[in-house]
Amino acid sequence: MRLAPAELIRRKRDGADLSPAEIADLVTGIVDGSMSDGQIAAFAMAVYFRGMSREECVALTRAMAGSGAQLDWAGADLGGPVLDKHSTGGIGDTVSLMLAPMVAACGGFVPMISAHGLGHTGGTLDKLGSIPGYDVTPDRPRFRAAVRAAGCAIVGQTDLAPADRRLYAIRDVTATVDSLPLITASILSKKLAAGLDALVMDVKVGGGALLASRESGSALAESLIAVAGSAGLRAAALLTDMTQALGHHVGNALEVREAIDFLTGRRREGRLRAVTAALASELLVLGGLARDRAEAAAATEQALDSGAAAERFGRMVAALGGPRDLVECPDRSLPEAPCRLAVVAERSGVVARVDARALGLLVVELGGGRRREADVIDPAVGLAEVRGVGAEVGPDRPLAVVHARSSSDAERAAARLRAAVTVGDEPASPGPPVLQRLATCP
């Protein structure tokens, strides 16, 4: 007999393991509306405190993957492997915007199912939503057509994994974002539903990540690899540093601009390049498009330097309704905030530490993220030219430039920015951006 949602929530609250059938009942309730938002929030909180066994997590992942449509690329005659990448989220993390067209230019096909921001971290969909006309939730025929035309398409969940879509939105506003089993199931349910041949995962650790410690990041990476393996999906995971912003810009339209500059070669920040190249190389090897990571790294560099990756990005944007000249003329289309303020540190010196989480929350306060599920994001606001650890700052070298809707917003953001950055006298090293390559599953 099917138990009521309240009874299943109570059992999980009290530490019991739920059976695959019971988890399937919960997922059905999430999708058909028989579970209220309050009950879903209670379930998420129970999992947050009680955790889930590996078997429960696998069952939740599979149930959410099967809660809606599932893509099958077997008859699409793409001519290459279906590949994808996922990040656990960070500050100034534009990797997906470059990696997808880079892999496409190397012969892969990337149907990337992304999401909006969670908590203080930016979301890839929010970034793409700053592009006028770009359809972040296309119907399935348009999605498939974009993948065929450009080799990549970065979109929202559409009709894939609807259970995760509802649970994800509630996690964002109930302080249950950083639950290892819920993160695992959320990531992999979408990827399994997308019909992938291989997946690479960027597990970020540090103050700006969902998981602050390297130990918790390793635990999540191991969980992701194990659950992916149980589903027969080839996967790899890298641990990467998120103790400071990954790129120069933080904010949706600003990050799109940085991604375009990266793809066209106008500017490629070293840490951002290192993480993007490492993840892209892993994916090419997993997909059989390169024999080893050295060959894969050479292929990705060629995709960038030849302009092929930038061309694929432009093709993707056009296929999904965005401006056809976005790559060539980003200033013509991307929104800009009316107020800009260069924030000078209270003393000259060298950046010794950055509170990356504070930077993310600062952008949320400016309107660039959500505090409540129904909030509308301002795509133009954020921080530009953010100085990282080891950078010199002074009167002519500001900590960052605030892009805000008003001068009062900018002044409040400036105070928070100064508090988030520690300036010292001694030279400082940011450390390597790629911390560890954990494992792969065949």
Image (cartoon, rainbow, N blue to C red):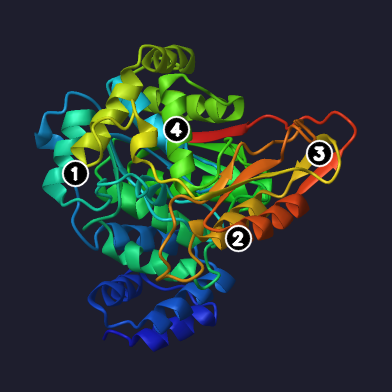
Query: From this viewpoint, is residue 201 visible?
Result: no
Where the C terminus falls, by quadrant?
A: top left
Identify the residue at image location x=53%, y=45%. Answer: 221
First in sequence, mark 4 or 1: give its number: 1
Cα separation, mark 3 vs mark 2, equals: 26 Å
Q: Secondary structure at mark 2?
A: helix
Q: Which residue is mark 1?
A: 143
Q: Are the residues at dot 4 and dot 3 in contact (C-beta closer than 8 Å)?
A: no
Closest to the camera, between mark 4 and mark 2, is 2
Cα separation, mark 4 vs mark 3, equals: 26 Å
Q: Secondary structure at mark 4?
A: helix
Query: From this viewpoint, is residue 110 visible?
Result: yes
Mark 1 burial class by Cα count in 10 Å: few <14, some 14-19, many 20+:
many
Closest to the camera, between mark 4 and mark 1, is 4
Above or below for 29 versus 55:
below
x and y percentages locating residue 241 in the rendered image: 63, 39
